[in-house]
Structure formats: structure tokens, C-alpha cells
Image (cartoon, grey):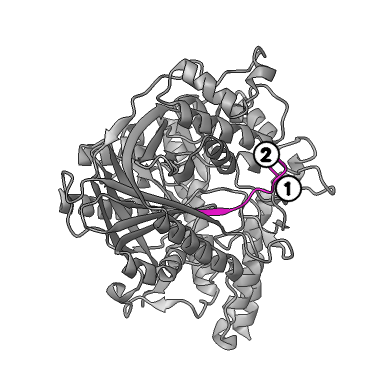
């Protein structure tokens, strides 16, 4: 009976954690039409601090006090008194080598083309909307729990948007096997769910000699909840606290959505395998500084848009563009309401800008897959490609998607060719209509012409799996009560762990990638003041390579920060503005030492193949 009482008390305490942001939103909604308007006004407030030693000391003290209260006091208290779900496994008896559906990648790395010396690539895609989507209410994986809906936004042609799994299969002709990349329209997927997708592909992997299967998320904030915390977190905590008595588990993520992710990913890979063509691969990079913005100090971000273009030898086959950009697809999240039915929150689902970038590239005759880059705390900029046009938040995502598509198409083109592309695709940015407006900018003006470099057929990939300690007790609580889908392990001392992966990828000599399971802060890649105190060297310094990051690959580990800057709810000094920025990102993280664990394991891979 005491356990039941404690479960109820814990439920109330957890609910208290959710109340402040909900009330903040509700209060401000009377004064602001959208989150965008609220954020803009807050950012424009004249609150300037000189970063004196005493102010720096106070900020650090405040952050440590906040970390102690949230994690070591409240988080630990909740984690201790709320019973584990029966899904939690024993850490000491867990055998990582026997944990299934891990693909290590290539046994050997090559430095030059081998065998057939030619690229092969196939593309496929499939919907991941559950079959009962139009009848059943699903939770949005957005900012607040318990926002349900079952309708997609319609695009500008009147068709419903969709949530997709897109897949490419790559082979360098060396005889070392096929490599698969899947990108799904979701906020993020726990490594345990990635392994479910791999399980669904096991027979195909054996038949087609697939040596690596990697699942990334586009990280949309307006899709179906894929991490459990937005559907019914409190109900899960209560029910799963009693699972040792009932023998039943209530998962946070709807099983019907997981099933559609598994089946949709399988269908996309099967289509990609059937679509395999030989051809050439080209690499180009565009400066996208005007389209991205790091919203939290220390400011450090990858401002580039990376593009791989596969051109089949067959004129009948469709070319494929693979794009990587570190940016949160959340433009369409910034409306309180879509203005329908008097609802406070927008309950329509959307794939954000990804849908519209693909739509444009399809109209130009290309397949398209977006793989999330070094996302960190980076979001869309250039006023969400507003151009001074009165628009809803969703329409800002439409415009952002189209403009990113135009940049991808026009990277290596002349001005005349870009104008022809714009006309052939229907002038989606409205140059003919809006050009000349005070804030309007034409997408192809001042856009540098960059070289498309032919990539030699060399594909190397290696991954490592390991356990990581969950030091963030709030995340431990979500995992141990099966709100989130993470595999959770518990040792005899009461500490919690999960399994994650990192990887190293080389595509020719042009693209070298750290495949990260979380949302990595840019200073860990580039260095600078934000990396001070970190026990490992920044990635580019350690490797001596212009490595880029693909985040949210094979896990959803949350934010990955320098322990020196790790704060659950506090302040970070922004030297660009002279202000102390509020920072709560690491509330969504495995813990302050996750960066050391992830990057340390990545360095082991890098050293082993060099």
C-alpha cells in the first residue's frame, strides 16, 4: 500500500515539473499571437551585463545550485521513490555483445577505390503514418504533452503532408557490402527502437550483404510523439510504477506508431535496393549563415549546407540529393493556435520544412533525403525566410523549405541557370510577386557559386556500441518508468545506464563524419572558449580533419555539452550580446559526462582505423 501512496505522491511531484511552462504559455497567450512574437520581444529587451569576474562567479554558482536542486535533490528523490518498470534490466548480468541488431560496419577501411571502382546508390521512401491515423488521436511530439490530433497540414497544392521514412543504400564497388541510411520524420528515436527497425531488416541485410544500418531523425517538432514524453507521461509513470504487481507495461510511445516506423523503414529500404543504379557522386558545400541561428551561448555552430548529388549513368534513372544541415525543423511549432475551433494549441501535424524541400526537388526531377547535421541549439533564421510577408508559422516553414531546396539546386549553377530553375519550378518564393519589398531578398542574389567536386568511390564506416550512465535523474525517471523507449539497466548501487552508439563515416576524401547519438554543442567540434575545461580535445583538433557531425544518429541522447557549461536550468553568458542567456537545454540529456563518453568512444574508433 505504501508503494501505491508513494506512486501517487510522485505523480503529483512530476506534474509540478510540468506546470511552470504550461502556465507561462497560458499567461502570455493573452498578450502574444505566437511564440515567435514572444521570443522576438524577449530577445530585444535591453538587458545587458558586463561579464565581470564576480558576475561570472555568480552565474556559475547559480548554475551549480540549480543543477543540485533539480538533479541531486528533486530528480534523485523522484527517481528513488518511484518504483522501476519491470522493463528495467540488471546491469551486472547484461551482456552487450549479446544485445542484438548492432551493425559494426566495415571490417577494413580503404584509402582508394577498389574492385568495380564505381558508386551504386538506391533511394526509397514510404509513409510512417499509422493506418489508423485519421481515426485515432495521436500526441504531437512538440513542446507540451497532451496535445492530440489526427490531421496533417495540406500543402500549397491541397494535398496532405505526410510523415516519411526515406532511405538510401550506398555501395562503393569494393565488395565490402552495402550501407543503409534511413531518415524518419520524427523528433528522435531511442536506440532500442532503432534496433527494432534493424530487426525488421535482418533477413534483407543477410540477403543483400548490408554491413551497416543507420537510422536518423529529421528532428521535426510537429510530428507524432516518438519519444513518449508528450503522449501520457503521468499515466505511464503511475501504471508502470505498479507493473511489478500487474505484470503489464504501458509504453510512452504508441506501439502502432513504432510498428509503422518499422514497416515504413523496411518498405523504403526494399525500394532503395530495387532502385540501385551505378553512377557518379558529387560533393558541394554552401554557406547557409543567413539561414541558421544558434540561440544559446556559447555561440558555436556549423553554418554550412552540405550536399551529395548522385547522378546515375542511366539517363532513365532519377538522380538523388542527400542534404545535411544542422538546424531544428521547428518553424511551424511557433504558433499558439492554427485559429481553428478556438483551440489554444495547434493540433495539426506537419513535417515542417522537410516536406517542402523535397517537394521542390521532386519537381526538379530529384529524389531527396535530409540527414540532420550538427543541430545543437541551432534553429532557422532569416526571420524563418519571412521576407516581410505576413504569414502563419506553418507558412514560414513552407517558405524555408522551398528556399533550402532552391539553394541545393542552385549551389553550382550560374545566375542564368538559377533563374531558369526558379521559373521551371513555379517561382515558389514569389519573386515575381514580392520582389522590391523592403524586406524581400531574392534567393539567388549574392549566393556564391560553389564547385561540385567528384567523389571517388570510397565508403568507410565503423560503429561502436557501449553503455552510458544516465546521470540526469529526470531522464532516468522517464526511462525507468518506460515513458521513454530506452533500454534501461540498473546496477546494485541504484545507478541507471542505457546503450548508445557512435560512428565514423568517410565518403571519398571529401566528407568525413562523426555520427553522434545526441544534439552536440558546436564548441565540442570547433573548439574555442566554449570548449575550455573539457577533458578531451575538440573533434577537429584531435582528428586533424574537417569532420562534420550528423546528430541524432541511431539514438536520441539529448543535448551533449561540455561539462563546464552543463546546466539544467540556469544562465550562460553570451559574449555576442553581452547578456546572460537563459539555458534549460540539458534538462534533455543523459548527463554532464555524456560528451566525454560519446566523443571518447568516437576517438577510439577514429584511432583504430587511422
Vertical placement of 471 versus 296: above or below?
below
Q: Residue at x 62, y 32 (%)?
A: 399
Secondary structure category for the residue under label 1: loop
Q: Residue farthest to the right?
A: 341
How many numbered discs sit on the rendered protein?
2
| Magenta span includes 161 | yes
Image quarter of the N terminus = bottom right
Query: In the image, is 335 to the left or to the right of 370?
Result: right
Mark 1 is surrounded, within 10 Å at the Cα level, by few (under 14), some (14 to 19) or many (20 or more) other residues, namely: many
Say if mark 1 contacts mark 2, CB within 8 Å. Answer: yes
Q: What is the span of residues highlighted in magenta in the rendered image?
A: 154-165
Q: Residue at x 67, y 21 (%)?
A: 388
Q: Which residue is mark 1?
A: 346
Q: Nearer the viewer, residue 463 or 133?
A: 133
Q: Residue at x 67, y 14 (%)?
A: 437
Q: Nearer the viewer, residue 608 or 558?
A: 608
Rendered image quadrant of residue 541: top left
Q: Which residue is mark 2?
A: 394
The x and y percentages for residue 254 are 60, 67
Whether residue 143 is visible to the viewer of this picture, yes or no, is yes
Amino acid at each position: 500500500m505504501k508503494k501505491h501512496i508513494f506512486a501517487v505522491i510522485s505523480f503529483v511531484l512530476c506534474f509540478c515539473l510540468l506546470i511552470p511552462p504550461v502556465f507561462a504559455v497560458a499567461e502570455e497567450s493573452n498578450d502574444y499571437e505566437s511564440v515567435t512574437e514572444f521570443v522576438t520581444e524577449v530577445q530585444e529587451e535591453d538587458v545587458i551585463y558586463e561579464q565581470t569576474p564576480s558576475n561570472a562567479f555568480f552565474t556559475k554558482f547559480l548554475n551549480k545550485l540549480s543543477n543540485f536542486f533539480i538533479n541531486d535533490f528533486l530528480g534523485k528523490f523522484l527517481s528513488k521513490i518511484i518504483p522501476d518498470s519491470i522493463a528495467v534490466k540488471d546491469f551486472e548480468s547484461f551482456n552487450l555483445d549479446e544485445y542484438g541488431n548492432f551493425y559494426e560496419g566495415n571490417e577494413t577501411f580503404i584509402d582508394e577505390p577498389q574492385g568495380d571502382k564505381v558508386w551504386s546508390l538506391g533511394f526509397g521512401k514510404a509513409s510512417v503514418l499509422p493506418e489508423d491515423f485519421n481515426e485515432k488521436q495521436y500526441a504531437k511530439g512538440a513542446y507540451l504533452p497532451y496535445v492530440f490530433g489526427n490531421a496533417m497540414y495540406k500543402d500549397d497544392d491541397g494535398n496532405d503532408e505526410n510523415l516519411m521514412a526515406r532511405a538510401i543504400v550506398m555501395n562503393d564497388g569494393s565488395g565490402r557490402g552495402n550501407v543503409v541510411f534511413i531518415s524518419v520524420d520524427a523528433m528522435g528515436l531511442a536506440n532500442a527502437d532503432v534496433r527494432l527497425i534493424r530487426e525488421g531488416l535482418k533477413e534483407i541485410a543477410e540477403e543483400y550483404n548490408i554491413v551497416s544500418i543507420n537510422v536518423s531523425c529529421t528532428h521535426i517538432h510537429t510530428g507524432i510523439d516518438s519519444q513518449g514524453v508528450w503522449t501520457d507521461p503521468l499515466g505511464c509513470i503511475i501504471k508502470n510504477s505498479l507493473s511489478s504487481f500487474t505484470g503489464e507495461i504501458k509504453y510512452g510511445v504508441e506501439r502502432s506508431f513504432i510498428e509503422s516506423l518499422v514497416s515504413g523503414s523496411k518498405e523504403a529500404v526494399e525500394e532503395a535496393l530495387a532502385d540501385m543504379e551505378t553512377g557518379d557522386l558529387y560533393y558541394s558545400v554552401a554557406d547557409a549563415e543567413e539561414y541558421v541561428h544558434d540561440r544559446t551561448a556559447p555561440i558555436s555552430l556549423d553554418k554550412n549546407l552540405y550536399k551529395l548529388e548522385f547522378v546515375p549513368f542511366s539517363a532513365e534513372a532519377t538522380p538523388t540529393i542527400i542534404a545535411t544541415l544542422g538546424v531544428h525543423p521547428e518553424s511551424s511549432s511557433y504558433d499558439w493556435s492554427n485559429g481553428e475551433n478556438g483551440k489554444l494549441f495547434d493540433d495539426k501535424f506537419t513535417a515542417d520544412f522537410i516536406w517542402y524541400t523535397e517537394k521542390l526537388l521532386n519537381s526538379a526531377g530529384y529524389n531527396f533525403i535530409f540527414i540532420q547535421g550538427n543541430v545543437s541549439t541551432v534553429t532557422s533564421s532569416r526571420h524563418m525566410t519571412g521576407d516581410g510577408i505576413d504569414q502563419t508559422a506553418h507558412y514560414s516553414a513552407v517558405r524555408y523549405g522551398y528556399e533550402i531546396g532552391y539553394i541545393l539546386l542552385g549551389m553550382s549553377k550560374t545566375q542564368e541557370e538559377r533563374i531558369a530553375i526558379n521559373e521551371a519550378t513555379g517561382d515558389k518564393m514569389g519573386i515575381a510577386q514580392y520582389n522590391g519589398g523592403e524586406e524581400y531578398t531574392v534567393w539567388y542574389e549574392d549566393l556564391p557559386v560553389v564547385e561540385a567536386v567528384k567523389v571517388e568511390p570510397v565508403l568507410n564506416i565503423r560503429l561502436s556500441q557501449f553503455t552510458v550512465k544516465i546521470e540526469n535523474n529526470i531522464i532516468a525517471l522517464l526511462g525507468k518508468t518506460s515513458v521513454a523507449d530506452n533500454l534501461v539497466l540498473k546496477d546494485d548501487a541504484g545507478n541507471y545506464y542505457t546503450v548508445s552508439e557512435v560512428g565514423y563515416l568517410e565518403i571519398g576524401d571529401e566528407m568525413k563524419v562523426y555520427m553522434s547519438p545526441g544534439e552536440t554543442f558546436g564548441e565540442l567540434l570547433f573548439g574555442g572558449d566554449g570548449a575550455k575545461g573539457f577533458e578531451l580535445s575538440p573533434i577537429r583538433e584531435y582528428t586533424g580533419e574537417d569532420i562534420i557531425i550528423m546528430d541524432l544518429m541511431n539514438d536520441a541522447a539529448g543535448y551533449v555539452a561540455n561539462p563546464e557549461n552543463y546546466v539544467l536550468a540556469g544562465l550562460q553568458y553570451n559574449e555576442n550580446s553581452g547578456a546572460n542567456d537563459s539555458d534549460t537545454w540539458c534538462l534533455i540529456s543523459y548527463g554532464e559526462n555524456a560528451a566525454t563518453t560519446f566523443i571518447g568512444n568516437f576517438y577510439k574508433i577514429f584511432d583504430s582505423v587511422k
